[in-house]
Image: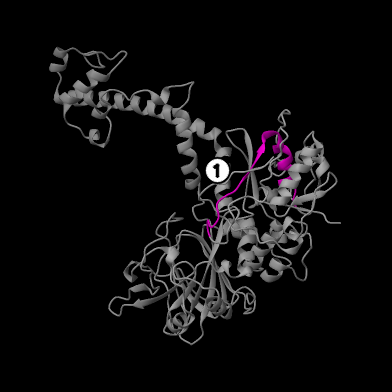
Amino acid sequence: MPKSAEEEGGGGGSASGGSRAARKRQKKRRQQQKPLIKASDNDKGNEDVEKCKRAKLPVSSKMNESSVCPDKIDDAKDATGLRSPHDILFGGEGIDEVEPAMDRARALLQSLLGADVSVGQFYREYWEKKCLHVARNDVRFFENILSKSDIEDMIKNKNMKYGADLNVTRCEKSERNGDVTRLTLDPLPDSGKIEDAIVAKSTDVWTNFENGCSVRLLCPHLYSPTVHHLLSLLESEFGCMVGANAYLTPGKASQGFSPHYDDIEAIILQLEGKKRWKIYHPVLPLPRDSSRDFNASELSEPIMDVVLEAGDVLYMPRGWIHQAVTLRDNEHSLHLTVSTMQRWSWADFLEILMPNALQTAIESESSSSLREGLPRNFLSYMGFMHDTNEDYDRMINAQRATLTGDIDKKGSCNLDDDEIGTMTQDELEELKRKEINKLQKGFREKAKTKIMKVAKEALAMVDATCDEIGKRFLSDRLPPALIQTESEGTFETGTKRISSETLCRMAREGIARLVLEKDDKAVLYHCIDNSLRFHGNPLSPLEFELEDAPAIEQLITTIEPDWLCVNDLIHEDVEDRIAIAQALYDEGFITIKLD
């Protein structure tokens, strides 16, 4: 049964440092391992249904092409029945009480995009490709998300700290060359450590604001349940970490930040007031790091110059240079920048995969190929400098020292010294070229063979790497912000004892992941106990015996609106079925049907 396997430096886990479900059974189970049944990972439609029937899994309504491949979406249905973000987050008219979180997440994204661009069209035509401005003409559309008065209350009552919770910044524009320079006015602690950050006094912040400074909230979800719900649901849509900053800027053409580009996909929600955005073509598509500030002389003509009004949305792929300024009137601007896809590229995947594949290939007991020595004197004919090397005598000596097979000490052409001595300079140059090319070709072929061995190992480790990056996501992401229909029947709403007849399901899809570790343990990673502050708590995954894995997988892949009876779990021992379900219930993963 489960054991707490706390890890240092992660983003999940209990604030007290231990799992609520660190309850260990004394009974040792040694039954034969059963195969895992992945009802949610199969894309063969009818085979899913049959497998679920054989394994007594519920036939989920989520087994369709759009859930397996999110880009394949029915455009005709996407842009219909739009609801406000607040109603989708917390319930309202038109909300189905058993609407799965993935459906609500899709509805939320569609709500942000408006009626003219479907989610499918957005992913095909805009995602990572180009900007999108959604003009809504509804200044009240985001009125319940976050407001200036909410921020005033936070700063006054929540002991927010400079550098950790907020920044106060302004930009100064040079009259000589038009360059915009950003100044950060945050007072620094004497120690220079973030844990000693200075608490922001409300009077100081608003004095600076009145003097033209912008206020940036670094973690608005820490103090706003609505923002937390928004980001948590979008994590279900994008399948990776989602964060946000809020930017409050005074009127009178104020600017808080210099022209730059970011390393995230940005969805900008204009909550209050207006702001003019100038966007420039990227110098590096899809960068992995944010840029320095750009000078005016480095900017071309903007490809988009648009004023966002309250209720509008602007999507901007990572890498697109931008700057924003309020209008010349006295109206302030407040926008929320939702960010995602940071360090979530194929490059990041391969940075995990390839070193592991290389190490596995190196340590192979069946092949010493990568442990073989490099060819003797290969540096005398490989590398950039040998593309134009004129030192024929040194080349010939290197060739004689390294050639094998048909190539003897007289050279690969089997010419004796007298024959070489009678050759013209052009013939000698041609001989040198052939010899060096043959050596270089041989080296490259050997290198290719070694590389392909690593690539073969890498292909065998793709699934394991997906588990590694999945663990990282669970460590990085926010704790799930559950709505009432999700939290009813969870451990948090009242302790219950599980029986063999109890009906249960996951509180929300994707909040836990089962991984088979090298020590033959089934380890369940989760984000239930994550902190609202990034990596604020250590991970505390649960360890199970390997034979528990099929039953656990049944539980964590059963999502609303379906229910799973504990007695139908894949385990020969009824007590084991109950104990596994009880452990997941106690941890907060699953909810039980109360009626």
Furthest-bottom residue in view? 330
The residue under label 1 is: 468
Is label 1 in a helix, a strand or a loop? helix
Q: Quadrant of the N terminus?
A: top right
Scheme by which the image is coloured: one colour
Q: Nearer the viewer, residue 385 or 543?
A: 543
- Where is residue 7? Give x, y as percent: 54, 46
Asked if the magenta segment contains residue 358, the reply would be: no
- Where is residue 160? Give x, y as percent: 50, 72
Relative to 394, does residue 335 appear above or below in the rendering?
Answer: below
Asked if the magenta segment contains residue 552, the reply would be: yes
Q: Nearer the viewer, residue 173 or 302?
A: 173
Seen at 64% across and 54% down, the residue is: 528
Seen at 55% across and 70% down, the residue is: 336
User: Is 51 displayed left or right of 406 in the figure?
Assistant: right
Relative to 493, does residue 523 appear above or below in the rendering?
Answer: above
Seen at 52% across and 79% down, the residue is: 333
Furthest-front residue in view? 26
Relative to 123, does residue 373 appear above or below in the rendering?
Answer: above
Relative to 485, does residue 53 appear above or below in the rendering?
Answer: above
- Where is residue 400? Give x, y as percent: 22, 18
Q: Quadrant of the C terminus?
A: bottom right
Residue type of the residue flagged with mark 1:
Glu
The magenta region covers 534-559
Residue 91 seen in render? yes
Residue 422 seen in render? no
Crowding around mark 1 (Cα neighbors within 10 Å: few <14, some 14 to 19, many 20+) is some
User: Is 489 displayed left or right of 427 in the figure?
Assistant: right
Please tell me in which quadrant of the rendered image residue 378 appears.
top left
